[in-house]
Amino acid sequence: MKKFINQHPGRAFKLLLGIAPFVLLILLYVMGSDARLEVNPNDKLLPSMSQIADGLERMAFEPSKRSGEYLFWQDTASSLTRLALGILIAAMLGLLIGLVTGALPMIAASLSPLLTVVSLIPPLAILPILFIVFGLGELSKVVLIALGITPFIARDIQRRTQEIPFEQLVKAQSLGANTSQIMIRVLLPQIMPKLFDAVRLSLGAGWLFLIAAEAVAATDGLGYRIFLVRRYMAMDVILPYVAWITILAFLIDVSLRELTKKLFPWYVQGGKS
C-alpha cells in the first residue's frame, strides 16, 4: 500500500478538499444558529442566514437615512484607501532601508541595531502618540500602518539582499560598475519580486493596524463600522463585514501574486513564488 505521506490529490480532488472545510463551517454555523433561534427567536449572537442577508442588503444597497450614502461601499473605499497608502509608503521605505543596509556594511552597522529596536516596538502602543502628533484624521491611520509594517519589510529585504551571491558583485566591479550602479542594476532587479512577497506577508498586520486605528478614531471604514454596531450586538452586520474583510484580503493577496508572475516571470519559473 502506498504510504499516505506520498499521496497527492488530483486537481479536482484538491479543489474539493479545499472547499470542504468552508462548507463544514457554514453547516455548523447554520445548525448552531437554528438551535439558538429555536430556543430564543430574539437571540442576536448567531443570526440566521436570512438575517445576515437582510443586514448586508441594508448596509450595501439601501442609502443611509442620515447621509444618503451606501455605508458598506463607503466604508470599503475609505479602508482600502488608508490601507493602500500605508502599504505603499511602507514598501518604499522598506525597500530603501533594506537595500541600503543589506548592500552597504557601513550603513548596516549604523542602522541595523536601530531597525531591530524599532521592529520590537508594538505599533498599537504608540497609537495614542500618533493621534497626538498627527491628529485624529487620515494621516495618523496611514502612519500607523506604515510604521507597523515598514520594519518587517525592511528586515526581509535586508536579508534577501545579503543572500545574493557575492560573486555577482565582484563580477560587476570587475566590469567597472560603481556602488550605485551595482545597487540599481544588479541588486534592485533581483530584490523587486521579493519586495512583493514581503508586502503580501505583511498584509495581515496591515489590516490589523487599520482596523485598530479605525476603531479608536474614525467616522467611516470597515473597522469603524464593526466597532460601532457592536454596541447593539448587531451580528447581522458584523459577520458580513468580517467576511468581506477576509475576501478583500484574499483578493489583494491573489492580485499581488498574479502581478508578480506577470512582472517577474523568471522569479516564478524558478519556483520562488
Image (cartoon, grey):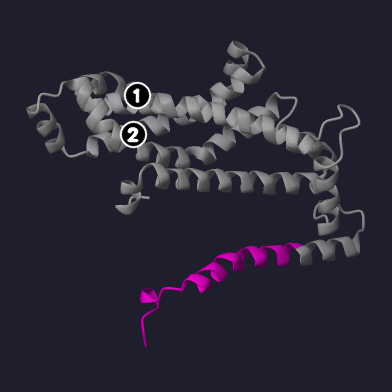
Label 1 close to label 2 by CB (< 8 Å) = yes
Please tell me which residue lies in front, 223 or 9. Answer: 9
The disc at residue 105 is none
Q: In this view, does 108 lie to the left or right of 31?
A: left
Magenta-drawn stretch contains 25: yes
Q: Position of residue 147 (x, y in %)?
A: 49, 25
Taking the image as drawn, is residue 207 in sight? yes
Q: Residue at 69% across / 26% down in the picture?
A: 216
Q: In this view, does 111 lie to the left or right of 209?
A: left
Q: Is residue 17 above or below residue 80?
A: below
Question: Which comes before the other along the chain, label 1 or label 2?
Answer: 1
C-alpha distance separating marks 1 and 2: 8 Å
Where's residue 97, x and y in %?
A: 34, 24
- Residues 78 and 133: in front is 78
User: Label 2 belongs to which residue?
Assistant: 157
Does the segment drawn in magenta span residue 15? yes
Task: Label 1: state its secondary structure.
Answer: helix
Kind of residue at disc 1: Ile
- Numbered label tally: 2
Q: Residues within 10 Å of mark 2 (few under 14, many from 20)?
A: many
Magenta region: which residues?
1-29
In the rendered image, which residue does mark 1 sit on? 97
The kind of residue on which mark 2 rests is Ile
Q: Quadrant of residue 135?
A: top right
Most distant residue in the bottom direction: 1
